[in-house]
Image (cartoon, rainbow, N blue to C red):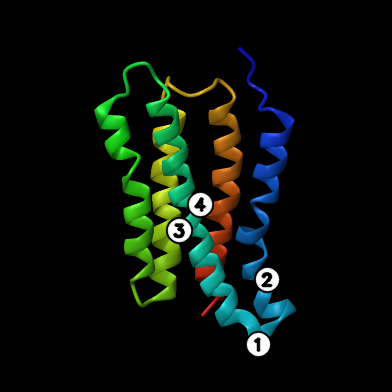
Amino acid sequence: MTRTPPFVVAAYGAAGLIPFLAPPLAPWLAPGWSGFAGQVLALYGALILSFLGGARWGFAVGAPRPSASTVSLAMLPSVVGLGVLVVPDRTVQLLGLAVALGLHWVWDVTSSELPAWYPRLRSVLTAGAVIGLLAGAAVLP
């Protein structure tokens, strides 16, 4: 069992951090776009949360006998992401997404159903995503 993710997975995962880490730079690099950058960050965070739920759903339904609880829990990230987006306060949106990604990370790294390399990859990617969301909550309107 390898603990190193396939190169293509790691590469796309790393590239996926750009939309988390670039928007918080807007106040310095493109001040007139700060509001838009906050919106993009929140939308991307919700999309990724939904994507992670879909990944868990895919792992679960690929099993010979899918776990009803895992399939059900895998639907929650999409609902939570949407719920966070309808909150009118951007800071609350970004903080809520950071918490939701953190909770999903706990679920992923404590699961024995996922590939051996997945927890390490998710730890790095979740750290980057949460840093971007927290930075965005601190500096974006």
Q: At 65% from the left edge and 87% from the top edge, which residue is drawn?
A: 32
Q: Which residue is mark 1?
A: 32
How many residues crowd around disc 2 within 10 Å: few (fewer than 14), some, or many (20 or more)?
some
In the rendered image, the vertical position of residue 111 relative to residue 80, given as above or below: above
How many residues crowd around disc 3 within 10 Å: few (fewer than 14), some, or many (20 or more)?
many
Q: Which residue is mark 4?
A: 48
Location of residue 47 in the rendering, given as x and y in whole percent from the top left corner? 49, 56
3D distance between C-alphas at marks 3 and 1: 24 Å
3D distance between C-alphas at marks 3 and 4: 5 Å
Mark 3–mark 4 contact, CB under 8 Å?
Answer: yes
Q: At 39% from the left edge and 20% from the top edge, which residue is drawn?
A: 63
How many residues crowd around disc 1 within 10 Å: few (fewer than 14), some, or many (20 or more)?
few
Asked if residue 110 can be seen in this view, the reply is no
Q: At 61% from the left edge and 40% from the top edge, which residue is drawn?
A: 124
Q: Which residue is mark 2?
A: 25
Counting residues from the start of the chain, the first of labels 3 and 2 encountered is 2
Q: At 67% from the left edge and 65% from the top edge, which residue is drawn?
A: 22
In the rendered image, the vertical position of residue 56 relative to residue 132, given as above or below: above
Q: Secondary structure at mark 2?
A: helix
Location of residue 126 in the rendering, given as x and y in whole percent from the top left corner? 54, 45
Three-letter residue code for mark 1: Gly
